[in-house]
Amino acid sequence: MYSLLLFLLSVLSMNELIIGELSLSKESPAGSFSNMNLENLNEMDIQEITRGEISSERFDSLDVKFVGNWPFGYSYAAEIDSARNLAFCGSGGGIYILDVSTPGSPVKLSEIRTRGVVHGLLYEKSNQRLYITARETGIELWNVANSVNPEKLGSYDTPGEAWKVAVSGNYAYVADGWMGLRVIDISTLSNPTEVGSYDTPSNALGIAVSGNYAYVADGDSGLRVIDISDPESPSEVGSCDTPGWAWNVAISGSYAYVADEGSGLQVIDISTLSNPTLAGSCDTPGSAFNITLYGNYAFVADYGSGLRIINISTPSNPTEAGYYNTPGYAWNVVVSGSYAYVADGGSGLQIINISTPSNPIPEGSYDTPYWAYGVAVSGDYAFVADYASLQVIDISTPSNPTLAGYYDTPGLALSVAVSGDYAFVADYVSGLRVIEISDPEHPSEIGHFDTPDYTYDVAVSGNYAYVADWNSGLQIIDLSTPSNPTLADSFDTPGWAHGVAVSGDYAFVADMDSGLHVINISDPENPWKVSSYAIPGRVEDVAVSGDYLYAVYNYFGLRVVDISDPEHPSEAGSCDTPGGALSVSVAGNYAFVADGRSGFRVIDISNPEDPTEAGYYDTPGEAWGVAVSGDYAYVADYDAGLQIYRNLLSGIEVEYKDGEKVLKVNQNLFLSTAEVALSGAEFPITLNVFDITGRVREKTIIYNSSPVNIGADLAPGIYFVRVEGFEPAKITKLR
C-alpha cells in the first residue's frame, strides 16, 4: 500500500514543506508530524489519504493536485443589491460582481472563484454578505461590502450537492440534493458547522424559510414542510406532492409557490402546515426551474421559454400576464424595482424591464462564457474553445490564471489548435476559423474556410489544417495564406469524422462508429487511405506518440493501437475508464484522458501493452478536453471553465539557495529514488541522508553539478538530506 500513498508536496517557504496536511519544518523535532505519524497509518488511513478524504481536497483524486482555475462559464444563478446597484451573476464556478447603475450597460467590478459550479446565490443586504451554493463543494460565505475586493469569510462542504440556501438568524439551511436538508451554524463565520439535518425522500433542490419552518422543493416528492424550531433536530410536519419535479419554492402569506419544472407554477395552500394542499396552478411552456415573488406577480425562470410573469393576485387562479423569451436558457431570476435579472445560461445575465408586466422588454445584458469543450496551450496562454467563443487565458501563474482576451466565433467553438501566431478553431456549422493571437489581449479573425459539414476537430501540421468534418470526413485546408485558407483536398471517411491527429505523413481520423482510419497525407493534395481499424464503441478522439496511437472510445476508455506499420494497425493494449472518454493528450509516459463526468484520468503508458491508471482528478464539471504542458494538465471542464492540475507523478522539484550555491531536490514519490543536483559549490562535497532518529543512513560524495540519485536502498519513511551550507531538505520514501 505504501506505493499507492500520496502526500501532496508543495513549498511553503525555503525550509518548510507540506506533505498533504502533515507539516514538517526545520524547527520540528526530527520525525514529528503536526497531525499524524506515518508509522501509525493503517491500511484504511492510507486508502483515505489516497482518495483525498483526509486532505482538504473536496474532490476524489489520486496522484494529481489542483493548482488553479479560470472557472467561468454557463450562468445558473443571480442576485441583486438594489441599494448599491450591484448584480451578482453566477458564471460556471465563479461569480461576476457587476455595477448595474446603468441597466443597459453593466460593468464588471470584480470576480469570485469557487471550486464547484455555482447554482445558488443568496444576498443579505443587512450585512452585505453573499452566500454561494456550489454543488460539489457545499456553501461559501463572502463579505462583499467592498465590491471591488470581496473577502471570503468561510465555507462548509456539505455531504451532498448544495443547490440552494436560505438563512435565518445564525443558521444556513441548505438544499443538499440527495442528502436532503442540512442545517449549518454560521455564528462563527470562519468556521461554519453542521448541527442538524433531515433526509428528504427525494432530491432537495430549493428552499425557503419562514418563521420556524423550512419549505423544501424536493424533486419528484414535491413540497416538504420541515419544523426547524429546534435547528439541531428538524422534523417533517407536512408535505404536498406536486405533479412535476419541484425545483424551487417561494413563500408569501399562506401560500407556497413552487417552480415545478414541466408542470409550471404550482400554488400550495400552507395555512394548515400538517396538510398543505394544491390551491391553483399555471402551466408554463418551458421548464420552470426557479421563482421569485414581487408584489402581485411570480417571476418564473422557464428555461427554454425565458422569463414568464404570472399574476398571483388570486392564488387559486394564477394567470400569465406577460413573458420575454430570453436568448439563452433561463435558470434563475431575481427582481428589484422595475427590473428582473435573469441568469440565462450561455447568454449570461439578462436585464429585463418589467415596469409594464404585460410587456417586458430587454434593457441590457452581460455576457458570460459558455461551455468549455476544447483547450490548447502555447507558451503562457491557454486557448479555450467554449462553444460560443475562443477564450485566451494567461497561465503564466498557473495558480491564478486570468482572462487576457476573447473572440466570439460565429458558430459553436468545439476545438482549437495553435500554431505560431494563429489559433485555428473548429467552429461546427461555421467551419474553420483562423484567429490571429499575436496580441493575446486582442485576438481577431483574419480568415475562415466554410467546410461542407460540421467541423468538430482540427490538427495543424506545416501549412495545412486537417479538419474532422463529420459526414464529410477529412478536409485538408491550405493555410499558406492564413487570411485566405483554401481547400487542398479531402477524403470522405465512411462514418462521422469527430477527431484527428497528424504524425509525419499520416493523418489519423477518429470516425465514431466506423473506428480509426489511417490516411496518407504525404501529398496533401492527394490523400489516400492506407488502412482502417475497427474497435467497438464510438471513437471520439486520437493522439499519436511514436509508434502508438491512443484512441478514446467513449464508454470503452482508452485503446492503444500499434501503428509502427501504418498499413496494418493492431491493438496493443487498453485501459477502461469509469466515465465517458471524450478527449486524449499524451506527454511522456502518460496519456491524459478527459473522461466526462469522471473528470480526467492519468494513464501510465510506459508499457503500451499494459496501460494502467496511475492517477485521476474528479473535476467539478465534465471533462471534455485536455491539454498538457510540462507538469500541468489543462482541462476544459464544460460548465466549470478551465481547471489546472499538476501531475505529481512527474515529480516535485524544491530549490534551496545559499548565496551562489543552489541545491535542487527532485522527488517523485512513486519512484524508489530522489534526484539531487548542486551548483555553485566547491567540489567534491558530501551529502548525508539522515533518518528521523538522526542516524546517517546514506552518504554520497558529489563531484560535480551533474544530478545524482539517492535513496535506492532506504526503507519507506521520512528522511532528511543534508549538504554543508544548507538547511536539511526533507524527502519521503514510499517504496
Image: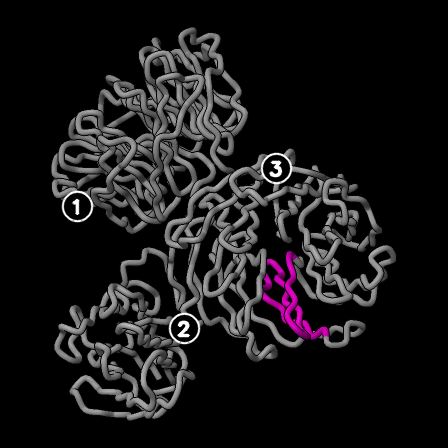
Camera-near label (1 vs 2) is: 2
Of residues 513 and 550, the one drawn nearer to the viewer in this rendering? 550
Under circle 3, the secondary element is: strand
Residue 329 in percent (x, y) is at 51, 29
Q: Nearer the viewer, mark 1 or mark 3?
A: 3
Mark closer to the observer (2, 3): 3
Report if residue 642 lies within the magenta region.
no
Q: Is residue 142 left or right of residue 385?
A: left
Residue 72: image x %, image y %?
A: 44, 41
Q: Using the image as rendered, state which of residue 623 and residue 240 is in the foreground.
A: 623
The dominant secondary structure in magenta is strand
SS for callout 1: loop
Quadrant placement of the N terminus: bottom left
In the rendered structure, the answer to whether residue 591 lies left or right of residue 122 reads right
Q: Whole-Å distance between the Cαs marked 1 and 3?
A: 45 Å
Here the colouring is: one colour
Labels 1 and 3: the sequence-earlier one: 1
SS at mark 2 in the image = loop
Q: Tell me the residue that label 1 is attached to.
A: 190
- Label 2 to label 3: alpha-carbon separation: 38 Å
**What residue does disc 3 label?**
444
Can you tell which quarter of the image residue 170 is in? top left
**What amino acid is at disc 1?**
Ser
**Can you give x and y, in whole percent of width and height, for residue 706 in the image?**
42, 84
Q: In the rendered structure, which segment of residues is drawn in magenta?
A: 540-563
Kindly indicate whether the residue at mark 3 contacts the one at mark 2 (C-beta within 8 angstroms).
no
Q: Residue at x 73, y 76 (%)?
A: 564
